[in-house]
Amino acid sequence: MLDEPDKHLDPKLCKLFMKVIRDVFLKIGIQVIMKTHRMDTVALSADGELFVIEIKGHDSIARIRLMHKMLAMAKSSRYAREFMGFQVKIYTESIDDSMFYRNIYRLLIAKEEKKDHLTAQGRLLSLRWRPEFHKVYLHEGVEGGKQ
């Protein structure tokens, strides 16, 4: 069990450290449990290697579950996304489609905002990832393709 062994490593050493863990320990069948808060370490994890421990109260484990690294990084970096002005752009075939999906998203957000019991993690839609809907063009003025 390793408690944040990557804490003081630069990204290159972190990558080398993860390689050593895989090439030495995992190859001979030693199970490694490592706690980290670093995005680069999470990004270096392979499918099936990353688990999230959800805590209930101060010291009680509510659930341990497998999580894809992209989802873990997105959840861990929600404030960074907001600070950097991260936006999701969704491209549709027509202006009508853009308006339709924009209105559906707004209705769903409004419905979720009425549910006071939901935490930020329990929401289906992110309140921070307000997507922008855009139409794409085949040619100037012709909808249905890339510009």
Image: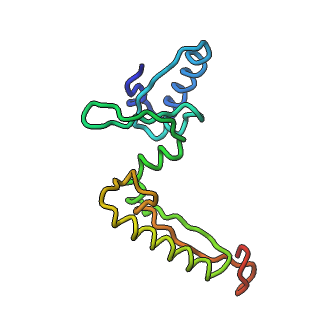
Q: Between residues 17 and 1, which one lies in front from this camera angle?
A: 1
In this rendering, the answer to whether 129 lies above or below 60 is below
Which quadrant, please, contains the N terminus?
A: top left
Q: Position of residue 37 (x, y in %)?
A: 40, 37
In this rendering, the answer to whether 112 lies above or below 48 is below
State the image quarter where residue 115 is shown: bottom left
Q: Residue at x 51, y 25 (%)?
A: 17
Q: Residue at x 40, y 68 (%)?
A: 111
Q: How many marks?
A: 0
In this rendering, the answer to whether 139 lies above or below 1 is below
Q: Position of residue 103 (x, y in %)?
A: 50, 77
Q: Residue at x 39, y 64 (%)?
A: 112
Asked whether, in this view, residue 138 is left or right of residue 129, the answer is right
Residue positioned most to the top: 28
Asked whether, in this view, residue 58 is left or right of residue 67, the answer is left
Q: Position of residue 33 (x, y in %)?
A: 46, 23
Q: Residue at x 60, y 35 (%)?
A: 47
Which quadrant, please, contains the C terminus?
A: bottom right
Q: Position of residue 146 (x, y in %)?
A: 71, 73
Q: Between residues 20 and 31, which one lies in front from this camera angle?
A: 31
Residue positioned most to the left: 58
Asked whether, in this view, residue 51 is left or right of residue 93, the answer is left
Q: Between residues 143 and 58, which one lies in front from this camera angle?
A: 58
Which color scheme does this rendered protein use? rainbow
